[in-house]
Amino acid sequence: MAQQTVTQLHARLASGADSDKIQTCLAISKIYAEAQPDSAVDYCNRAMRLAQKQNNRRDEALILLELGRINELHHHADLARRFTNEALSIFRTLHQPDGIAMAYDQLGLLDGLQKDITSATTDMAKAMKFYEDSHDTSGILETYHGMGAVYEQKGEIEKALTYYLRALVQYEHRAIKPEAYFVLLERIGHLYVQKGDSKTALRYLEEGVRNSNIQKDRDTEITLLDEEGKVFEKEGERVRALSAYKQALQEAKKYNRPQEEAQALINIAGILKKQNAQQSLADLKQALKIASDLHQPKLEANIYQALASVYQQQKDYKEAMEALEEHHRLLDSLLGADTTKDIAELDSSYALESQREKVGQLQQVNKKESNEISLGIVILAAALVILVLLYFYARKVNRLNRELQASNKIKDTLFSVIGHDLKGPAGSAAQLFGMMEDGDFSEEELRVMLSELRAQTTASFDLLNSLFEWGRSQLQGVRVQPEVLNSKSIINKNITLLSQQAGLKNINITDDTPADTKVFADPNHFDFIIRNLLSNAIKFTYIGGHIFISSTENDKEMIFGVRDTGIGISELQQKAFLKSNLSVSFGTGGEKGSGLGLLLIKEFMIANHGRIWLQSKEGEGTTFYFSFPKK
């Protein structure tokens, strides 16, 4: 139904008059707000341009309220508050009580999300006064609903119920129930479940389902049936829970709601897991196909987790492990996608805010020019001053943008490494421990699982060491204390340290550097560089391969090389290394490399006034060269 509405709105936007397009853009934005916030902000942008062109201040304020709501939905509280306060200021200037009340309502919800109940109730009380003075029943209902949501966020169930039930009374005698009525019943039912009063919860949920059936062509009962099924399941009434979930499935198919259809199948599979595992697996696979068609990785991840549980119950540990691995892979991809989406939403909102600031400045300039046209010289001077201010303002904005990009880069690297490269091995290890504790395995199966655990924990430890060094360099800067070193002793120490790792793959390491080789460098940095390059060479060298360490010198610098007979690096990745860094990759034994160590090496080489480069051919091996200037 929502898709049909969007299609109709797009058609109206293409053919309607400019005066109608603002409300159409706002309507589309409201639909996109939760699932596609970047698109929602874009339609607000379009509406704002039209409103400014028509000098329609009320619509400008309504658009700002919508931008505040979008940012509130996605937890950008500061931006949400800025937009809402600006809308409130415009409504005050226009002396429009309904707009002022809407703004206070939204500010109250923001305060509630931040657990500031005192400010939330103050703002909501101001909104209520405006609605009562103007006898606005719908506004009063919204404020009751908002107050209930604020106390629900705080965990004060009784107060939340008080306001929700006040709102519900207002709907009792309406022949046609709006969507907000059914949402209200679902929230009331949910709170009674939290109180442990399942009987009362079911009464409200069943009322919602009953009224939804009376009003045909309403898809509101799907959520109510889902909540009803959960209550029955919690009470141990599996037959009634299954009936509710099946009814939800039928309604989801009827109204073409594939996501709810998939969720209903997951719920049904959970009920059938113990008594009919094959049907449970069939339902989950059907749900997985729907989720895949919808491109919903979070839903897919939940389904894979449910599949793993059924497979584990059936003692099909191979399928269980594969399902768990896919579950973790999807969760890892979601972290990166969410980070990118959050940045895109912030960029869109900041872009609109910047545009509004510039528009405001230009409006002030135009007003001065029109009022002071007779004072040409003064106007020219004022324009020049404004241009200079704009120039410095632009420089400041560019500087802040560069700082923001640098900050985002550090944040993205941390999130990527912690969320993807560290969370994955830790999660897999935890799952393996759980399976080892619950399952009945042969000695050979246990040996394989212990080997996998060793690999996962070793990778996590290496990554934590690199992450610690990198984090310290970002926070404190790279500190260099160079001295004349005997490189041979440091190289031999690291060969000994990594001999066990090399021995597992039967790799020989040959040090061809002269015994008296001296180098002027920071000893800790030189030690880290040798250890990391040797460790990488072992990862990416085939079983039975060879690693060579060499050194040469010229008049200006001492050059070292670490050469392996491994898988090599593609020309595309070599170019990427020269510009930034190598991406995450896997060794010949399935070892995972995050690329963080090489990033640190490059920073250490720059700090020591050295350089690093590589030569490689795929299938034949790689040589990393690094050099230090002579003292």
Image: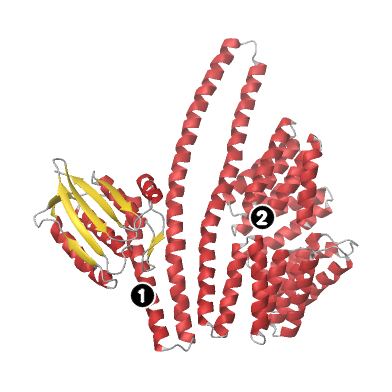
Q: How crowded is mark 1: few (under 14 residues within 10 Å), some or many (20 or more)?
A: few
Which residue does the image show at 69% across and 39% down from the upper left? Answer: 46
Q: Which amino acid does label 1 sit on?
A: Arg
Please state the horizontal and vertical placement of residue 82, each as a whole percent of the image: 61, 44
Observer-side mark, 2 or 1, equals 1
Specify the quadrant of the image occupied by residue 354: top right
Q: Distance between the residues labelled 2 and 1?
A: 42 Å
Please state the horizontal and vertical placement of residue 25, each as a whole percent of the image: 74, 43
Give the residue number, with chain letter if any, for mark 2. 34
Instruction: Describe the element under mark 1 as helix, strand or loop.
Output: helix
Specify the quadrant of the image occupied by residue 486: bottom left
Left or right? Give the position of 173 relative to 551.
Answer: right
Residue situated in front as seen by the camera: 439 or 578: 578
Left or right? Give the position of 127 relative to 481.
Answer: right
Q: What residue type is labelled 2?
A: Glu
Q: Can residue 118 be seen in this view?
A: no
Q: Is residue 496 visible?
A: yes
Q: Is residue 610 above or below residue 511?
A: above
- Looking at the image, how many numbered discs can be counted on the residues? 2
The C terminus: image quadrant: top left
Q: Residues within 10 Å of mark 2 (few under 14, many from 20)?
A: some
Which residue does the image show at 67% across and 57% down from the upper left? Answer: 121
Left or right? Give the position of 168 relative to 362.
Answer: right
Residue situated in front as seen by the camera: 132 or 503: 503
Give the residue number, with chain letter if any, for mark 1. 454
